[in-house]
Structures are given as structure tokens and as C-alpha cells.
Image (cartoon, helix red, strand yellow):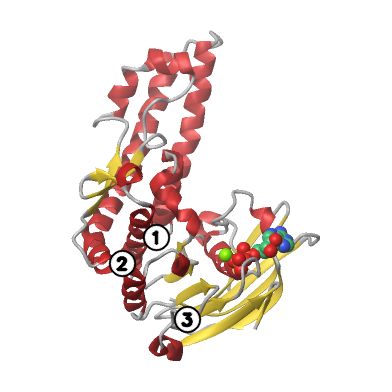
Amino acid sequence: MIINNIKVRNFRCIHNAELEFNKNLNIVVGNNGQGKTSLLESIYLLAFTKSHKTNFEREVIMTGCDFTKVNAAVDFSETKKDYSIVLTKKTKKTKINDIEQKKLSEYIGKINVIMFSPEDLRIIKGDPNIKRKFIDLELGQTSPIYIFNLLMYKKILKQRNELLKKIQKNEIDDYILLDVITEQLSQYASKIVAEREIFIETVNSIINSIHRSLTKDLEKIRIEYKKTYKDDLFEELKNKYKYDILVGSTSMGPHRDDLVIYLNDEDISIYGSQGQQRTAVLSIKLSLIEFVKSKINEYPVLLLDDVFSELDSTRLESLIEYIKRNIQTFITTTDISFINDELREKANFYYVEKGNIR
Ligand SMILES: Nc1ncnc2c1ncn2[C@@H]1O[C@H](COP(=O)(O)OP(=O)(O)O)[C@@H](O)[C@H]1O
Ligand SMILES: [Mg+2]
């Protein structure tokens, strides 16, 4: 898919920008703090209705303004569509072709975006919670049913935890209800975990050839999904009722599962250098491009924030080799000296200064 043009209003330091994009490469240039990341973040918001930097979307509304609006025309292989999002401090409204989309779960994933940003190191070093969010986001963008199952799971999990607390305080003594809820929870859990495992398997089947071409050596990378239970969540939770009641929460399930990334069979979060970790994240992100393509038969848009300040020249060359493929790519950088003539010819350049983009 290709984002043809965009309009950004009151988004962080960008007051008003109207841009036409190149279908291959778009290079966003400027000093620090001028609004390069903000432009990418506005595309991310349009795709996911969320920010990749903050859990509080309203922070992206320009200080002193009541709303922010982003809209864009997107070309798919068969159709074209207009997308828009308007955020106020309290509301979020999305439209496709001027028709309001009441359910966010039906809007998210229509524009597919893979973003690589400095924050992404958290996929490797962060809490399990952050790793799960990563899976949920990337998987959710190609699978509405996954988003639905996840919403149901969270709802039932909340009910279960409330019930556990009530039993703990002797307000209720209803073990039959606890059985029922645990059974329901386990059913959604198995759907979620099955889809997560297929997702990780697919990424594993792609990632090594990408990683090798990025590193030009034979590091072997592998992602492992770590479940908090063995096979039968229902049976295993039943055996832990006493404990769960004592702590007032559900001790196992996809809301507790984790992700470990291995480089040559060693946990990269412990043994990997900063450079190896960054490259691993980049390999994961590039693999996701192929994952999205395999699911929806369209290439997603690639957003690369500040990659060039982070990679050495070999990795840089390989990355540039990779993005020569026909995947619409946005790159931010403070320094354009790394860009060779061949890429320059393909690219549009955008110069950003104090939120003004030309
Ligand atoms: N809600 C906001 N309203 C106005 N300005 C903001 C808001 N949030 C961030 N900024 C400003 O916008 C700029 C953000 O720049 P950023 O896109 O991160 O720059 P770059 O990526 O070019 O270094 C910073 O100068 C920051 O102070
Ligand atoms: Mg930036």
C-alpha cells in the first residue's frame, strides 16, 4: 500500500502540513527537535489510532489546541481510500471515505504500518508486558479476530480477578461460577496463544535470511514464545485456585506470557551488545513486512525513525539494499550524507524546521 498524500493539523509541533509522498522513498531531514519523528508518529496514529511514544494520545495534540487531525489518501493494489482521525482531549473519531467507523477494532489494521524507532529496543529489553503489547499490535493489524479474542479475554480476566477477590474476602463462595469463568477464559486463551505461536513461527521462518543479510555473518536468531502454563490452562488454573484466591489475581495465561529472543542460542537481552540488540529489532521489523504481506497480500508502509544514527556502515548498506524493494519507506535523519545517488534519485526530500515541512 502507498500513502499518496497526508494532511496533518495541530500534531505536536506541526501546525499544518500538506504533503504529497513518493511511492518509494521519503526522506525527512532536519535537526533534532524540529518535528521529524512527529510526522512519522502522525502516520502511525492514523494507522493504529495510537501513538508509539505515549499511552496518552492526547499528548500529541498541539499545546493550546483543542484537537489534532490527520488524514491521508491511500492506494491499495485494487482500490484507493481516504482515512482520517480526529482526536480531542476526550474523543477519538476515525473515518474511511468520510464514513465514521464506530468500532476501532474494525478501523485498525486497514492501513498497515511497520515502524522502527529508538523506543523499539524495549521489545528486547522491556518487561514481558511490553513484549506482549508488541505482539498484540503487530498481530492485531492483520487479524481482527485476534483483536476480538483479546478483548473478550481481557473482559473475562477482569471478571475472574474480581471474583477471586470476592472469594478472598469471603463475600462470595461460588466455586461453580469460578469454574465457568475459568473455562471461558481458557477457551479464549487457547485461541490467542495459538495465533501468537503461529505468528512467532512465521517470523522465525523468515528472520534468519534477513538477519544474515543485515549482519553479513552467521549469527542465528530465534524468537521463542514462553507460555506460563503447559497445555491445559483450565486444568492448571483449577489446581491453583487456592493461590489465585490468596493473591486475588490470575497467575497464568496469555496475559502473563513472555517472549525471549536468542542470538546463537543465548538470550540477547542479557548477552547481546547494544548494536546486536538494535540489529535484532530491525530484523524482526523487516520480517514483519513479509508477515503482513503473507497475510493480506499487500506490502505495509515502512517507517524508519533515526535508524541511521544507530547502525554501522555495513548494516546501513544492507538496509539500504533492502529498502530498494518496492516498499514505500519513510526515513528520518539529521544527516543526508549516507544516502547514495541511486537512492537520492528515487526519493522525495522533506526539510523540517520548527514544525514546518517543505
Ligand atoms: N503537544 C505538543 N505541542 C507542541 N509541541 C510539542 C508537543 N509535543 C512535542 N512538541 C515539540 O515538538 C518537537 C518534537 O519534535 P520531534 O518530532 O521529536 O523532533 P525530531 O524527531 O525532529 O527530533 C519538540 O520540540 C517538542 O518540544
Ligand atoms: Mg526524532
Residue 5: percent from the left, percent from the top?
57, 81
Say whether marks 2 and 1 touch (CB < 8 Å).
no
Quadrant of the displayed image that contains ligand 1: bottom right
Residue 314 placement, left or right of 9: left
Q: Which of 132 and 208 lies nearest the eye of the viewer?
A: 208
Task: Please tell me which residue is depicted at 22% across the width and 60% down the height of the picture.
Answer: 208
* First of labels 3, 2 by sequence position: 2
The secondary element bearing badge 3 is classed as loop
Examine the image and state in which quarter residue 314 appears. Answer: bottom left
**Residue 139 at least partly seen:** yes
Of labels 3 and 1, the one closer to you: 3
Badge 1: how crowded within 10 Å, few (<14), some, or many (20+)? many
The quadrant of the rendering that contains the C terminus is: bottom right
Q: Look at the picture and state if 186 lies above or below 350.
A: above
Residue 45: image x %, image y %? 57, 62
Q: Mark 1 sits on what residue?
A: 142
Q: SS for tag 1?
A: loop
Q: Residues within 10 Å of mark 3 (few under 14, many from 20)?
A: few
Q: Position of residue 260 (x, y in %)?
A: 31, 43
Name the residue type under label 3.
Ser
Residue that sits furthest to the right in the current view: 64
Q: CA distance from mark 2 to mark 1?
A: 12 Å
| Relative side of 248 to 216, left or right | right
Secondary structure of the residue carrying tag 2 is: helix
Q: Where is mark 2, residue-wise? A: 290
Say the numbered circle drawn on residue 337: 3
3D distance between C-alphas at marks 3 and 2:
29 Å
